[in-house]
Image: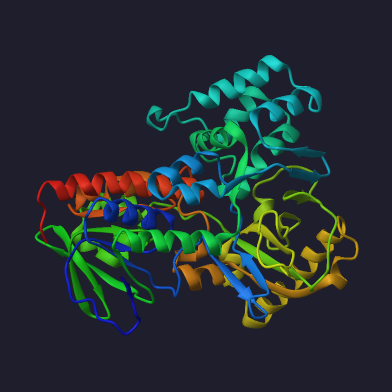
Amino acid sequence: MLYKVRDEVTKDYDLVVIGSGLAGMTAANILGRHGYSVLLLESHNKLGGFATWFFREDRKHVFDISLHGFPVGMIKTCRKYWSKEIADSIVQLKDVRFVNPQFTVQTDFTKEHYTQVLVEKFEVRRQTVDAFFDYLAGMNFYDNSQLTNRELFEKFFPGRNDVVRFLMEPITYANGSTLDDPAITYGIVFSNFMSKGVYTFRGGTDVLIGKMKDELLRNDVDIKLQAKVEKIQVDGGKATGVRVNGKLIRARAVLSNSNIRSTVLNLVGEDFFPEDFVQKTKAVRLNSSSCQVYLGLRAGATIPYIGELVFTSSYPVYDPERLLDLKVNSRTFSVYYPHESRPLEPDARVAIVSSTNCRYDDWKNLSPEAYEEEKVLMIEETIKGLEAFIPDIRMKLEVIEAATPLTVERYTLHPKGSSFGTKFEGLEVSMNLHKTIPGLFHAGSVGIIMSGWLGAANYGAIAANSIEGYLETGASP
């Protein structure tokens, strides 16, 4: 059932899930389908976490938040853990473009075409390209290799910043990876995309989350929105429930889809963990965040086709640190063409979402006046960047809005508004949480390789398997 805001939860559950990101929802759906009693709690007024959207002008405009491209594996994940209907609505983005001072490339983002471009346009030896892809395919999280992304690229493409830009820049936008992060965080994600390209959900995020909510309710998962969890209850060394508005909701197991640092240090508290586990948690670095500019066209306004995903930059070389600058000169445009990526009502408008990576502190440290000024400047620079592709775009716009890391923090409660979870070391803490406090599990965007829609959903499935094993032991609160 879907609880109303004022409704009190009066029963116990096998599992309480904190947060309705794709990891939390996927785990809840699997356990509900398997006959366990599940309560899904969400602090916001709608499901989805960072997989979200908003409407403007009496629903004439709808905007998806951030970038939502994912590998083909999402089809299998949705078919297995959600429904055939959801899986069948996933379609390929066939036109991904790169426009920067070093090169201009149009691609379907498949291994075959990437290989062709690397050999023919960048003049890299075919043997080198094949060896690079073979190396990525053989990477395994459990190998514990200390190789960094910088070392990986120097190994195969020494001195070729242009090649690194072509291979690395889209993944930097996808999960915040830098050249100094472990190569495994790049290799797994890039290999997933390279299998068959980039995909998205036809119809938009609002349609997807609506279908997921219906599926959750069909599987008897109880849902309560605007329910902010204050504490995870721990008794006798194991998780026994959560507190919401001072009231204890008891459960045999708890799954947190909140940030791993927030889960350990705030929702539970340091006193319940061994000192070494606390120190490992405190050492987990948050990943970078992002800004978005949302542009909605007037009724009847059209634009020339410029591609579905456009990575554009005026910066002369690839530099992940410069991608985070407040004075941004690199951005990604996601273009939503009515009746293609978003087939809605007959009068559906074109929507364009610009995304840029950024640093939370750069925005947090601004005065209120400077903050508003920077938002206005960001919007202006975004429109100028788009004018390079659509010269008359300015006169066609009806809705213009922007979001910063502070916006992300406000709606997702994620520390520092991080769009991509934590750095690689967060994965170890997340995966070992239930070994430290029985009955307490975590799933979400951690370790970079678990970032994005596919990673989050699959991590929810992994967590669900562990939770079911725990519940089958006869665990009780």
Which one is nearer the viewer's eye here, 268 or 198?
198
- Point out the image quarter for the C terminus: bottom left
Please give the name of the residue rendered at 29% of the width and 52% of the height, measured from the top-left corner.
Answer: 33
- Point out the image quarter for the N terminus: bottom left
Please give the name of the residue rendered at 80% of the width and 45% of the height, measured from the top-left corner.
Answer: 99
Colour scheme shown: rainbow
Which one is nearer the viewer's eye here, 466 or 157?
466
Please give the name of the residue rendered at 33% of the width and 49% of the height, measured from the top-left corner.
Answer: 430
Residue 462 relative to residue 12: left or right = right
Residue 319 relative to residue 429: left or right = right
Occupied quadrant, residue 394: bottom right
> In x, y percent, where is residue 247?
21, 79
Q: Is residue 269 visible?
A: yes
Query: Looking at this rendering, what residue extends furthest in the right direction?
Result: 391
Residue 290 relative to residue 137: left or right = right
> In x, y percent, where is residue 36?
21, 56
Query: Looking at this rendering, what residue extends furthest in the bottom direction?
Result: 6
> In x, y percent, where is residue 16?
26, 63
Please give the name of the residue rendered at 50% of the width and 35% of the height, measured from the top-left corner.
Answer: 188
Residue 171 relative to residue 379: left or right = left
Occupied quadrant, residue 213: bottom left
Q: Is residue 424 visible?
A: no
Give the tally of numbered discs: 0
Relative height, residue 161 to residue 415 (above, below): above
> In x, y percent, where is residue 105?
79, 38
